[in-house]
Image: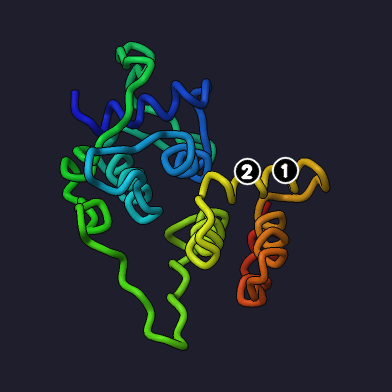
Amino acid sequence: MGELERTVAIVYKRKGKNLVSEKEFLNTLLFNMRWSDPGKAPKIEAKDAQRILDAAKSSGLLVTKEGMLQPAFDYRSIDIPLNYQPSSEVLKEIGAAATPMKAGVKEPQPLPGQELQAAPIADIPLFTVLIEDISQKTQIKKKDVVSRINKLQERFGVVPEVAALIVARDLGMDVSKYYDITREEILKK
C-alpha cells in the first residue's frame, strides 16, 4: 500500500462517510490534515491537492458514483495511526512534488503593481481559490480565514463562497473579480 492509498483512506475516515464531493475531498486535504515535514512548508497547495485527487481517480482508487467520489477499495481495512500525517511522499509518488514543498523555495511573486492571477476555477474549487487569495493578500493563516468564514456562514446562513467574499471585503480586499464566478457557482448548486 502506498502513500496515495493511505491519503485517500484517511480522507474518508476523517469525513466518516463513503461518498464525498470533489470539493469536500479537496477541502479535507487542504484544511483538515496537518501536512508537515521538518524544514519544509507545513501545508500543500491547492494545485497539489488537485493532483492528488486526479491521481487517485486515474489510478482507480476513486470512482464517481452519482456525481460523488467513492473509494474503490476498502479504506476501513487500512490501519492508520490516530496521529497520522500525510507526508510530501504522496506528491513524489504521483510525480507531482511541487516546488513550494521544497525547503527554501518561494512562490513566484508578482511585480510591483501586478496581482497574481487566480487559479483556474475549473481545476480548483472556488472556495479554495478564495481562501488562498485572502490568506496571501492579508497574511492571515488559512485556518484562521476558514474559521472566520465558518463563523460568518453560521451567523447569516449563506453559502461558503458568499461568506468568503464578505470576509475578504471586510479585510479590505477588492472582490469584484469574483462576483460573476461566485454567482455561477451558486446557481449550479
Vertical side of 4 occupied by 46: above or below: below
In percent of width and height, residue 189 lies at 68, 51
Q: Which secondary structure, mark 2? A: helix
Percent position of residue 38, x then y? 23, 38
Q: Residue at x 34, y 44 (%)?
A: 42
Residue 100: in sight, yes or no? yes
Q: Nearer the viewer, residue 23 or 167?
A: 167
**Above or below for 25 versus 165:** above
Residues tagged 2 and 1 counted as in contact (Cβ below 8 A): yes
- Kindly indicate the quadrant of the structure image that contains residue 61: top left
Is residue 188 visible in the rendered image? The answer is no
Closer to us: 126 or 33: 33
**Tag 1 secondary structure:** helix
From the image, tell me which residue sits under label 2: 147
Task: Give the label on residue 151, or none.
Answer: 1
What is the residue that sits farthest to the right in this orientation? 156
- Residue type marked 2: Ser
